[in-house]
Image (cartoon, rainbow, N blue to C red):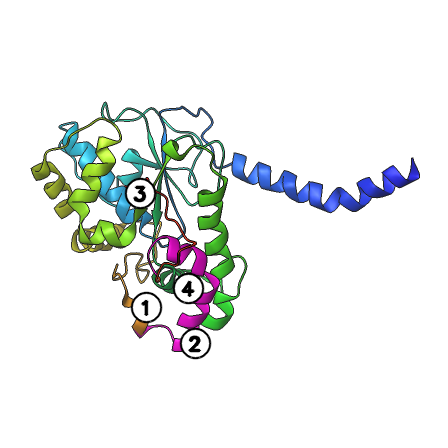
Amino acid sequence: MITKFLRRMADRPARMERRRQRESLERLVPLAPSSDDTYIVAFAKSGGTWFSFLLANVNLLLNQMPQTATWWNIRDYIFDIHESRHMPPSPFAHPRGRFIHTHSEFNHRYLRVLYLIRDPRDALVSYYDLTTKFGWFKGTMDEFLESPKFGIAAWVRHVGGWVHQHTDLNRIHFVRYEDLKSEPIEVLDRIYRLYGLEVPPEMLKKAVHRSSFESMRKSEADYRRYSYDLGSSFVFVRKGQAGGFGGELTPAQIARIETGCAEWMKMFNYLPVDKSATAPNNRA
């Protein structure tokens, strides 16, 4: 009995951590979840907001609604689980179900996922900019990269969790940010075919134009000027470049990211692929 008690006491921190993780993930599930819900999952600053604008504008056009997605109304169309678990039904008839934006690590409650992945060299540069502006992180870039909460380990944990732990490959579809940038109409077409929908190319082109970085910057500037949510000097939409990290990271920092993130960078074609790495075959 004493031995059993001591073992339970020794295991208590691990049990408490597992419970904390379960509760944390549960808070990132709507109060009334549905199997029709689609979760737009991305590591922070990987293009999730832009992806939300694209999907919202496609859905608005597809459903013949007169609105355009802006910073004022985006969460009326693409809900954000980090803002509230209370969510109304989807405003759209097509596709069926709600679209929900989240940065959650692997969550077994998410039954349908669009996972947006971005080159970690770009994502971590943008994330560092965000965290320092908000005061969430106050160290150097080198310190940021080594941070288990924000840096390389966090990116690896996020991507690796979704690649490794999901059990049904048909419920998650990986989208590379860089492909979405270079071929948005083709990528969006493949995404909507997952829902059995053929969206006219002209409609997709119009949605892409409405979601351009120039349009998003203008919308954000108007929102920042009149909203209480953001300070007048804060800018969320940066350059949105693919491969722009070279001017912001030192060679040593680039090498550190490439070493730490090598497995997933190779899998998603950000580094030369070796024979042992096989990319998921269901990328949108």
- Look at mark 3 in the image and give the residue it sits on: 283
Mark 4 or 1: the one toward you: 1
Name the residue nearer the viewer: 182 or 143: 182
Name the residue nearer the viewer: 231 or 13: 13
Q: Where residue 30 sits in the image (x, y, percent)? A: 45, 30
Would residue 273 be seen by someone viewing this image from the given angle?
Answer: yes
Would residue 140 be seen by someone viewing this image from the given angle?
Answer: no
Label 3 or label 4, whichever comes before in sequence order:
4
Label 1 or label 3, whichever comes before in sequence order:
1
- Look at mark 2 in the image and give the residue it sits on: 252
- Look at mark 4 in the image and give the residue it sits on: 128
**In this rendering, is residue 281 above or below 117?**
above
Q: How crowded is mark 2: few (under 14 residues within 10 Å), some or many (20 or more)?
A: few
Q: What's the residue type where badge 3 is placed?
A: Arg
Q: What residue do we see at 39% from left, 49% from top?
A: 278
Q: How far apart are marks 1 and 3 (CA)?
A: 24 Å
- Look at mark 1 in the image and give the residue it sits on: 245
Label 2 or label 1, whichever comes before in sequence order:
1
- State which quarter of the image contains the C terminus: top left
Q: Residues within 10 Å of mark 3 (few under 14, many from 20)?
A: some
Label 4 or label 2, whichever comes before in sequence order:
4
Asked which quadrant contains residue 102, the reply is: top left
Q: Distance between the residues labelled 4 and 2?
A: 17 Å
Q: How far apart are marks 2 and 1 (CA)?
A: 13 Å
